[in-house]
Image (cartoon, rainbow, N blue to C red):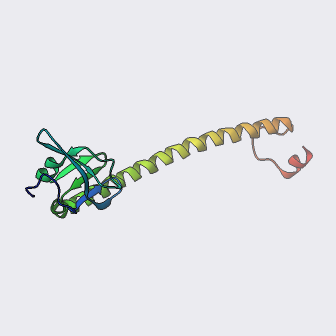
Amino acid sequence: MHDSPWPEEEEQWVIWNGSYGIVDTVTISRVEVGSGIRNAWLAEPYHMVGPFSLDELETGGQISFAACIVMSRQRWQEEQTALRRESLEKRRQAQKEMFEEFARYNERRSQRRSHFRQFNEKEQRELLNLPLEGALEASQIKAA
């Protein structure tokens, strides 16, 4: 990209978080050169990213970390449609799994409440000397 061992002053890189579908731009805040390798760190608010090989980022066009990808603006232009589709599909799948888990949780919870309700009703009927099963008439309830 350039001949200097240091990045251009305001060279912008794209940072993409596919988990959330968020795109932002970032600059390189610090570069350390040692043993022919340039290690870099991103600027705030992504300053926790680093060290990574600046040479790899410049030659390969991207680096990955956690749920994010840092890439050149050119690479973003080429790949953004596919990345956005992939991200959307992952979020849909995660949402589907979450709804299924909620349904299982609520079903288990409902079964426990139903069992608890049946137990309480039987116990209450015994205490009031009412028939243990079947519909009760208003007169039976009032007499109890």
- Viewer-side residue, 65 vs 92: 65
Image-based side of 99 in relation to 65, left or right = right
Image-based side of 54 in relation to 102, left or right = left
The residue lying at 83 percent from left, 50 percent from top is 137
Q: Residue furthest right?
A: 143
Q: Split into 4 quadrants, where in the image is the C terminus?
A: top right
Q: Is residue 7 above or below residue 35?
A: below
Q: Split into 4 quadrants, where in the image is the N terminus?
A: bottom left
The residue lying at 11 percent from left, 51 percent from top is 59
Image-based side of 59 in relation to 69, left or right = left
The residue lying at 46 percent from left, 45 percent from top is 101
Q: Residue 113 placed where, x, y %?
A: 65, 42
Image-based side of 19 in relation to 140, left or right = left
- Viewer-side residue, 70 vs 7: 7
Quadrant assignment, res 83: bottom left
Q: Residue 77 placed where, x, y %?
A: 18, 64
Q: Residue 130 placed where, x, y %?
A: 84, 39
Q: Residue 103 placed where, x, y %?
A: 50, 48
- Viewer-side residue, 55 vs 90: 55
Quadrant assignment, res 26: bottom left
